[in-house]
Amino acid sequence: MDEKAIKEKMSYKVLFKETEYMKYIIGKLISRFGDSLDIVAYGWMVFKLTGSAAMLATLYAVNGIPSILFNIISGVVVSYLPKKRVVYLCDIGRGLTVFLTAFLL
């Protein structure tokens, strides 16, 4: 292969033409945006309810603990389970948690 063919094969144009990849990237962008809004909304809610910056800092600190503790274990467990079912169950669980929080507020 000549150098021009290699550069064309490795360009972003080729990558952006992959529709499944673009669906994945757009889905991830929307998901990360939602996660960011979620973190800000919970922080705002805690600060409005308590008026305490210390509680807000505690919320952000505690928010990261499950990721640190469960990411390693959950990756291994999920590799043995049907992926779609895991995604559905996690999304439903998160949605119910957010709904319950809003209802209780």
Image (spheres, rainbow, N blue to C red):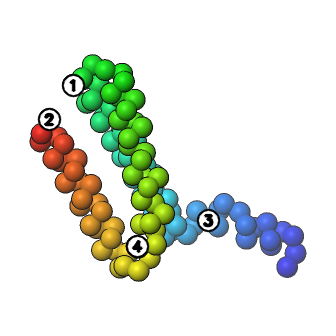
The residue beneath circle 1 is 49
The residue carrying mark 4 is 78
Find residue 48 and report its image quarter: top left
Image quadrant occupied by the C terminus: top left
Badge nearest the viewer, 1 or 3: 1
Q: Which tag is nearer the camera, tag 3 or tag 2?
A: 2
Instruction: Determine the residue located farthest toward the right in the rendered image.
Output: 2
Which mark sits nearer the N-terminus, 3 or 4?
A: 3
Q: In screen coordinates, is 8 left or right of 99?
A: right
Q: Residues within 10 Å of mark 4 (few under 14, many from 20)?
A: few
Q: Distance between the residues labelled 3 and 4?
A: 28 Å
At 23% across and 61% down in the image, what residue appears? 92
Q: Which of marks 2 and 4 is nearer the N terminus?
A: 4
Instruction: Give the residue type that dot 1 points to.
Output: Leu
Q: Determine whether label 2 and label 1 are within 8 Å by CB.
A: yes
Query: Where the N terminus falls, by quadrant?
Result: bottom right
Asked whether the residues under the numbered discs 1 and 4 touch, taking CB atoms below 8 Å apart as contact, a structural biologist would say no
Q: Does dot 1 land on a helix, a strand or a loop?
A: helix
**Which residue is identified by label 3?**
15
* Neighbours of disc 1 within 10 Å: few (<14), some (14-19), many (20+): few
**Amino acid identity at mark 4:** Val
Q: Which residue is drawn at 57% across and 67% down?
A: 17
Q: Which of 8 and 53 is in front in this view?
A: 53
In this image, 72 relative to 41: left or right? right
Asked whether residue 66 appears in the rendered view, the answer is: yes
Question: Upstream in the sequence, badge 3 or badge 2?
Answer: 3
SS for callout 2? loop
**Gap between marks 2 and 1, in whole Å?**
9 Å
Residue occupied by mark 2: 105
